[in-house]
């Protein structure tokens, strides 16, 4: 069956005005009641880089996890962030933004592809020591807006390197919305059967006009895990000046309902979470 990660962190991080901690807590608590597999709730990164997420630890201590099976994911950008995140038993996944784009890595975490790969290996050790799982996002997986080299062979090369390093959760990400459905389908159709130990996910930023063909290409290629955002808003502030919104979670739910591939979603809780998202984010 399909798994969905809801990403309130992605919706909030690019908003300039600081969202009060109590509103973040209300927003994420509503999401936790819906039945998503995972909730990407916050990040342990430099408050100078992403000021909106500076209260992630405080938010976490106020979340109500008593009546939810959703697992929590926090984004980290270095070993210091990982050291902070692993102190919380409530967190299952640490998400790290790797990329095959040198320009994106320089903008996002002030690193190179090679240094970021070395960091992935160190983060795996940290996760293993603290009973956490590392989700490695491969940003700019389906194209490059900066003029860096990009092709499917390069993407598959780094998937292979991550596999050899021990990564078992890879989310292919298009953070600027330029990926073509054919590239998404081709890459996943090759990678999924070749690396059966890896759980592949998809994190797309898309226009409202082309999300379906991209999701369809991924689904037909065997992808079972997708990221979405209730409001459809979001984006990486470091990727560029024009933020392209995430896939709206409602689109994902409707699509996989048609395919009879979705279970465990509470419709009433989803509507309530949408309302809270509209109040706080929109």
Image (tube, grey):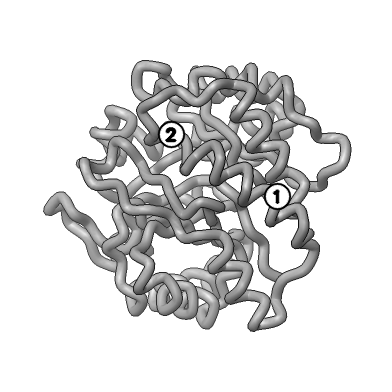
Instruction: Say what secondary structure mark 1 lies in.
Output: helix
Q: Nearer the viewer, residue 128 or 74?
A: 74
Residue 242: image x %, image y %? Answer: 23, 47
Callout 1–callout 2 Cβ contact below 8 Å: no
Residue 86: image x %, image y %? Answer: 65, 24
Q: Is 36 drawn above or below residue 192 in the view shown?
A: above
Q: Nearer the viewer, residue 97 or 156?
A: 97
Which residue shows up at 30% across the image and 47% down it?
243
Q: Is 214 drawn above or below residue 231 in the view shown?
A: below
Spatial CA distance of label 1 from label 2 is 22 Å
Instruction: Say what secondary structure mark 2 lies in.
Output: helix
Q: Which mark is residue 272?
A: 1
Q: Is 92 drawn above or below residue 169 in the view shown?
A: above
Is residue 73 something that shows in the picture? yes
Which residue shows up at 64% across the image and 23% down it?
22
Rate crowding at label 2 as few (under 14), some (14 to 19) or many (20 or more) other CA atoms within 10 Å.
many
Left or right: where 62 falls relative to 50: right
Which residue shows up at 36% across the image and 50% down it?
139
Residue of label 2: 13
Mark 1 vs mark 2, foreground winner is: 1
Is residue 190 something that shows in the picture? no
Residue 75: image x %, image y %? Answer: 52, 34
Residue 118: image x %, image y %? Answer: 41, 34
Classify residue 268 by image quadrant. Answer: bottom right
Rate crowding at label 1 as few (under 14), some (14 to 19) or many (20 or more) other CA atoms within 10 Å.
some
Q: How many marks?
A: 2
Which residue shows up at 73% across the image and 43% down it?
32
């Amino acid at each position: 069956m399909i798994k969905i990660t809801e990403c309130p962190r992605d919706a909030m991080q690019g908003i300039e005005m600081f969202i009060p901690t109590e509103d973040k807590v209300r927003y994420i608590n509503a999401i936790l009641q819906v039945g998503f597999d995972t909730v990407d709730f916050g990040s342990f990164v430099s408050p100078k880089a992403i000021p909106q997420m500076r209260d992630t630890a405080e938010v976490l201590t106020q979340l109500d996890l008593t009546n939810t099976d959703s697992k929590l994911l926090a984004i980290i950008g270095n070993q210091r962030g990982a050291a902070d995140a692993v102190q919380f038993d409530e967190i299952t996944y640490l998400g790290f933004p790797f990329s095959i784009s040198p320009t994106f890595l320089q903008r996002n975490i002030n690193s190179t592809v090679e240094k970021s790969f070395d960091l992935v290996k160190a983060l795996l050790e940290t996760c293993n020591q603290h009973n956490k799982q590392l989700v490695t996002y491969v940003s700019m997986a389906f194209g490059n807006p900066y003029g860096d080299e990009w092709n499917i062979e390069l993407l598959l090369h780094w998937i292979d390197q991550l596999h050899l390093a021990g990564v078992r959760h890879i989310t292919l990400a298009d953070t600027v919305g330029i990926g073509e459905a054919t590239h998404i389908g081709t890459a996943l159709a090759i990678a999924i059967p070749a690396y059966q130990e890896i759980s592949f996910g998809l994190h797309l930023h898309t226009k409202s006009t082309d999300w379906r063909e991209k999701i369809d290409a991924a689904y037909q290629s065997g992808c079972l895990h997708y990221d979405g955002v209730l409001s459809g808003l979001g984006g990486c502030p470091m990727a560029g000046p024009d933020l392209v919104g995430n896939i709206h979670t409602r689109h994902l739910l409707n699509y996989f309902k048609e395919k009879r591939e979705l279970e465990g979603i509470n419709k009433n809780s989803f509507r309530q979470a949408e309302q809270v998202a509209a109040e706080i984010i929109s």
